[in-house]
Image: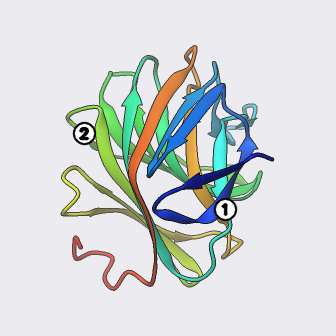
């Protein structure tokens, strides 16, 4: 697996699933997802989709990972994602995703055997900041439209308390999707208050 180094992410990253194309420079990562790529285990019994390209790293201890995510939305459910990955039936993703109504939204999915799907709020524009926080055996997803005040999206645990963490792009119904992650920052330490907006 090809290793990727990013400023602001002091851990070795590697592709779990390769994208169509990618580039990394300083603290920015650009990813091109291929056609009909997704990460979802249908709770209704439909076919599982696990082919979305994802770049992952092992990170020890408590941390926060944040990035500004910009998506070239073309088709329904195109998304740029921060992801936690243990295995094919245990993972979670925090998405900046376009809805069938053409609204960019913050969306989250937690998979424990099968996936759930939760829409949080609509974003005005093609970029938003996403953040994952690890707190011992638990995790928190946050999103911010200004990089200052963070809104709690969800607080949860996975079966595995030490999943790999990283970046993903998807285009479930489209011919591909371009995503840019910048202002990437992986910081050790525990987030003090999930609901303070900090």
The image quarter containing residue 40 is top right
The answer to whether 125 is drawn above or below residue 130 in the figure is above
In the rendered structure, the answer to whether residue 148 lies left or right of residue 184 reads left
Viewer-side residue, 12 vs 170: 12
Q: Position of residue 95 (x, y in %)?
A: 45, 44
Q: Which residue is rendered at x = 76% and y = 46% of the image?
A: 2
Local packing at callout 2 (Cα closer than 10 Å; few below 14, some 14-19, many 20+) is some
The image quarter containing residue 47 is top right
Viewer-side residue, 119 vs 128: 128
Q: Which dot marks residue 123?
A: 2
Q: Which residue is rendered at x = 38% and y = 54% of the image?
A: 130
On the question of residue 78 being in view, the answer is no
In the rendered structure, the answer to whether residue 166 lies left or right of residue 75 reads right
How far apart in space, not on screen, are marks 1 and 2 (Cα)?
Answer: 31 Å
Callout 1 secondary element: strand
The answer to whether 30 is drawn above or below residue 82 in the figure is above
Q: Position of residue 64 (x, y in %)?
A: 44, 71
Which part of the image, by quadrant, shows the C terminus? bottom left
On the question of residue 5 being in view, the answer is yes
In the rendered structure, the answer to whether residue 10 lies left or right of residue 86 reads left
In the rendered structure, the answer to whether residue 143 lies left or right of residue 139 reads left
**Furthest residue in direction right, as rendered:** 1
Q: Which residue is rendered at x = 19% and y = 62% of the image?
A: 148
Q: Mark 1 sits on what residue?
A: 12
């Amino acid at each position: 697996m090809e290793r990727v180094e990013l400023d602001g992410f002091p851990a070795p990253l590697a592709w779990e699933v390769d994208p169509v194309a990618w580039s990394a420079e300083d603290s920015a990562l650009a990813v091109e997802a291929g056609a009909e790529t997704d990460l979802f285990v249908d709770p209704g019994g439909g076919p599982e989709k696990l082919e979305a390209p994802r770049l992952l790293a092992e990170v020890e201890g408590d941390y926060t990972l944040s990035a500004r995510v910009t998506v070239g939305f073309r088709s329904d459910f195109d998304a740029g994602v921060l992801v936690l990955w243990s295995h094919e039936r245990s993972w979670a993703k925090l998405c900046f995703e376009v809805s069938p109504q053409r609204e960019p939204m913050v969306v989250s999915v937690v998979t424990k055997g099968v996936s759930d799907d939760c829409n949080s709020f609509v974003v005005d524009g093609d970029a938003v900041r996403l953040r994952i926080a690890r707190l011992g055996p638990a995790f928190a997803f946050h999103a911010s439209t200004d990089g200052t005040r963070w809104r709690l999206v969800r607080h949860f645990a996975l079966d595995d308390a030490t999943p790999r963490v990283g970046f993903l792009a998807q285009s479930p119904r489209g011919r591909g999707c371009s995503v840019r992650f910048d202002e990437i920052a992986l910081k050790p330490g525990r987030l003090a208050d999930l609901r303070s907006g900090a």
